[in-house]
Amino acid sequence: MIKTLIVDDEPLALDIIESYIEKIPDLELVARCDNAIDANEILQKEHVDLLILDIQMPQMTGIELVKSLRTAPKVIFTTAYSEYAVEGFELDAVDYLLKPVAFDRFMKAVNKVKDGNDKSHVAADDDYFFVKADKKLIKIHFNEILYIEGLKDYVIIKKEAGRVVALQTMKSLEAKLPSNIFMRVHRSYIVNIAKIKAVVGNSLELIENGKTKDIPIGKNYKDDLIAIIESNKL
């Protein structure tokens, strides 16, 4: 069961989300709050897996609440104001729902939570993700990525056409990627498995801009890579 806390200063919004939760067997409502301060008290006392949280609230916003938590549960933001989307995604929210929230859209967000760290499949209509770069959210499709390189708090997403540099950690980005498409092969590199052309010693080859690109293979990742090769998944 996914223990869920909903927070919204609008009673009708709380009622709607609660009615949606009642329709989904995997969700268990822990509590509902009309402000972030009460929600914070509950989070300190109760185990919560999922926080469904309105952004714009008096006294303390939903974003301020998440930033104040030492360890936050998975978060689905809800709001009537689309301009808050960028800040919501910066906090690695599972999803961002614009009010009024339709049940099918709510269900899709919950399914992302239910998938958790299991990235073994990607829905046909969910073959992309967003990253913040150049003060905007950029949509990137999985199949256009060659590899991802980590540089401290930044990542370079190398695409078949150009690249995107985003302020994000490799760990948080890796969590968004399906494991049937991407693989971590080095502390600083994630590659698109389908783009691998060859493995030579402790490196693998991709084709970047018509030229061979060598990517190092970390010793802690090589066994997993070889296992994929031997299972004919490449």
Image (cartoon, helix red, strand yellow):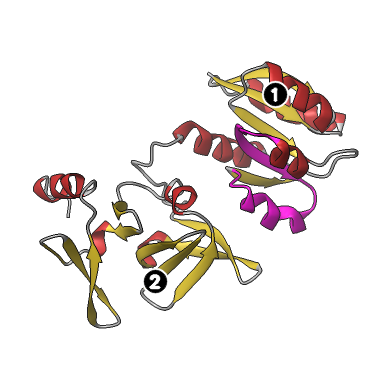
| Residue found at the very far right of the displayed protein | 58
Residue 43 is labelled as 1
Residue depicted at 77% across the width and 45% down the height? 79
Quadrant for residue 200, please give it.
bottom left
The C terminus, quarter of image:
bottom left
Q: Residue 69, image x and y in percent?
A: 68, 34
Left/right placement of residue 170 relative to residue 100 reads: left
**Dot 2 crowding, Cα within 10 Å, few <14, some 14–19, many 20+:** some
* Magenta stretch in the rendered image: 69-93
Badge 2 element? strand
Q: Which residue is mark 2?
A: 159
Residue 25 or residue 183, whichever sits in front: 183
Residue depicted at 55% across the width and 40% down the height? 108
Mark 2 or 1, nearer chain start: 1
Residue 94 is labelled as none
Placement of 135 over or under 31, stated as above or below: below
Badge 1 element? helix
What amino acid type is highlighted by mark number 2? Lys
Residue depicted at 60% across the width and 31% down the height? 73
Left/right placement of residue 103 relative to residue 218 reads: right
Q: Nearer the viewer, mark 2 or mark 1?
A: 1
98 falls in the magenta region: no
Q: Residue 50, image x and y in percent?
A: 61, 29
**Dot 1 crowding, Cα within 10 Å, few <14, some 14–19, many 20+:** some
Residue depicted at 42% across the width and 37% down the height? 117
